[in-house]
Image (spheres, helix red, strand yellow):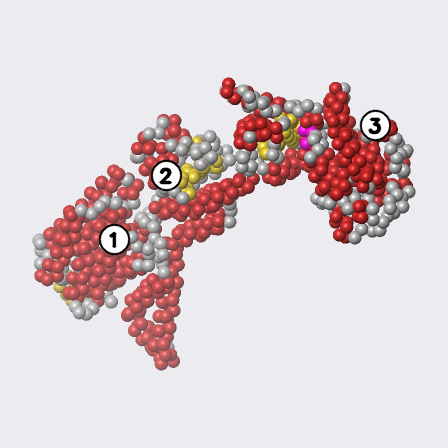
Amino acid sequence: MSGYVYISLAALYCYLFFMAVFLPAKKNRLIFNFMAVLLTMILWTGGSLLMRLQVLPSYRFWYHVSLAGIWLLPYSYFCFIREFCRIPAKGSHRLWGILLLAGTVINFATEWFLAAPELVESNGRMYFVYHMGPQVCIMYGLCVGAVVHMFRLVRKTRKRDPERAGKLNALLLGIVILILGNVGISVINNFPLDILAGIFNAVIMFYSLYSLRLFTLTGIGSRGSCYVLAIGISVMAFYNLAQTMNEVIQEKIPSMGSVSVMVVVVVTTVATWLIYLVMKMLFDRIFIGEEASRTEKLSEYTMAVSSSLRMNEIFQAMVSVLERVLNVKKIYICVEDEDGRYPMVYSSSPLDDRSFSMTGDHPLVRIMEREGECLLLRDFKRTVEYKSLWEDEKEQIDAMKVECFLPLKDNGELVGVVFLGPREGKRGRRERFDNDDISFLRSIQSVSSIAVKNSRMYERTYREACTDRLTGLLNREHFLKTMDEFYEKYKNSSLALIIFSVDDFKLYNQLYGEAEGDEALRHIAQIIRGTVGESGRSCRYSGKEFAVLLPGYDIFSARGLAENISAQINDINRQRGEDDTYFKALTVSCGICAIPYAATTARELLSNADLAVYHVKRTGKNGIMVYSDQFISEKTGGAARDQHRSKYEEYAPTIYALTAAIDAKDHYTFQHSKSVAHYAEALAREAGGSEEFQEIVKEAGLLHDIGKIGIPENILNKKGKLTDEEYEVMKKHVASSVEIIRHLPLMDYVIPAVIGHHERYDGRGYPRRVAGKDIPLAARILCIVDSFDAMVSKRCYKQSMPVDEAVKELERGAGTQFDPELVPIFCEMIRSGRLKPILEYHVDGAEENAL
């Protein structure tokens, strides 16, 4: 085989390699045109190789095949570059194809333009000698004319899109080398200079595909392509080598002469397999290595965001994958808010300025909604929307050094915009986004849009589940969870709670209707939300009550805020027109408590704020009370105490009417309630409770068993042990007591003590099974004194227990059934004689007056 044949063989291998890459690739017009270029190259180099090998039918036939590739190569290049430059086809463009195809057919029939070379033998070797006449200039002229037209298209594109045109520089250089190589045949007649130029052109193609990334390839490098190439290379390589190997084995290793053919077959098979591995590795490394890496990163990102419903987690994953794959250091994300604006909510660096915001009619928002595609800054600058921006808006975008905008959409609605800074190259230089980058960003956009859609649906559902529909504030359930979270976070600093209770709201509804009442609640909620802002959390605590949590606030700051809100609420109906002057003024009773000043647990914080509200309600309403033992004691003195006494005198007949009804049914319950009230008041006083608190505990003691009026007498007065069914009936007296008290005017403040007096400190009591400090303090006091009186009293089913034994029983139950801090106080009072047990039930005048 001539050495010149190897040049043709190398060129053919190069173009077959490229064709094998593109055959399994996903096709489009650009790739089809590039494959046409490769096909003409294969016709040219393959025909040249078979001509030099003088393969049947004749070398002249393969010469014309090779020449057809040369004739059609300029037009195939022309079509590819026109498509790459995105220039529509015209009639003048197709004219080149017609002329070059006609020249090919004419020369095949007549050999007028360029005759087949003459086969000459010299020194035992065969050479091809070309004889060119002046008519060959027509052939070269047509080819050069098509190339010149092609250069004009590139020049036109360079003015419009210099970056895109710049990617063609290497290919244009390869075309020039091909022209010079074919012209050089006339100078160096018997050397395949044209084919050698084709090898240089193949190297340039490789550079353009690998380094410049002319276009994106997907689905390339299949196993079948590698097998075909490996077999082809093996066949060509072992075409002459197999015979030589067989002769060498028979001559050098006679013992293997009989199996020499088998050895050659094995060597050929192994060589084919090795070539396959090399080709596969080359495909993966050169063409799909980076694409595979990006696909893997995209898959990881898809899995990460598909398992997350939090917007911040999605944005964090998006920024991470963009930084790793595209090497973008500046990333900003704007998301639509409830007002239709697009403020910046996330950035790649916590130190970035996030003051940037866009309105719903911002030009960039409009073009993102319309196009819905990735938009480069240089393309945006050529639009009318960019020209309509104010200068300060342009300066803001320039200051962020943005190079690309990526829209995030939800069912056609723009929900966000991602701002991407420039790519950083390996040497720290700025690089522009290429086609592969844009394709990757489209994939990120598709995945992110779905993730953002799911996140928005989740957050919308979560927000609806957490908010009150009428007012838009947090509902009670979520507020209590928030309070527990805030307590854990701020228990070592300060946390204030304000409860606002609308005064006489039931009367307001009766006077003006529920629709007007709902409007008043919405107005109050708007005032609270607007005043509190981001300083705390606001909720609708109950029908007519609102609560505000204020982390970092002390009682004085909280009181100032409460005064501000109360004043605004009081002005609601005063701002109506003259026709609405009949609306009564709205007022609120406010209770304030703060950690660590007046509470040690979240539940105690809530209970104390409630207690402060009750105090305001009982002392005239329309006021603010800060929970503090000393402060409440001061306020309950003098006129306040007289006012409370007058209030108590109003509902005292109701209490005695109910207790008298119980006495008629069960004398023990009536006497027991008075004893419990006496013990409870004494223990509350000894524990440091305010006079207000002592009075509440005393009244709760009187009413704690009022629900027994609904228990059948056969159960109340049973002499033996109650059955399980009877015990369940007896336990219902707590719920009955609460239900009765709810209908007593101004008495609902004793409900927490009544409902919890059968709870155990270890959480095994009833009816709510709460434990520890979550049980209201008044209920923990009632639990101790109620149990003590039951033990020392004689009943129809048991004898009385000695006082000492009862005290010891209380001490044994401390920490399990009873509050371990209150039990020692009560036991010490009994043992010291400061609190005398009531062992025989009787009511003298003094005690009755006290009750």
Q: Nearer the viewer, residue 715 or 616?
A: 715
The tag earlier along the polypeptide, 2 or 1, is: 1
The mark closer to the camera, 3 or 2, is 3
- Residue 33 - label: 1
The mark closer to the camera, 2 or 1, is 2
Location of the C terminus (image quadrant):
top right
Q: Quarter-wise, where is residue 265 in the image?
A: bottom left
Circle 3 is placed at which residue position? 849
Residue in the picture at 32% in, 75% down: 246
Q: Nearer the viewer, residue 503 or 331?
A: 503
Q: Nearer the viewer, residue 306 or 635?
A: 635
Circle 2 is placed at which residue position? 369
Crowding at label 3, few (<14), some or many (≥20) Cα neighbours within 10 Å?
A: few
Residue in the picture at 87% in, 28% down: 845
Location of the N terminus (image quadrant):
bottom left
Q: Secondary structure at mark 3?
A: helix
- Using residue 343 as the reference point, say whether residue 188 is left or right of it: left
User: Which amino acid does the dot numbered 3 rest on?
Assistant: Asn
Part of the protein shown in magenta: 610-614
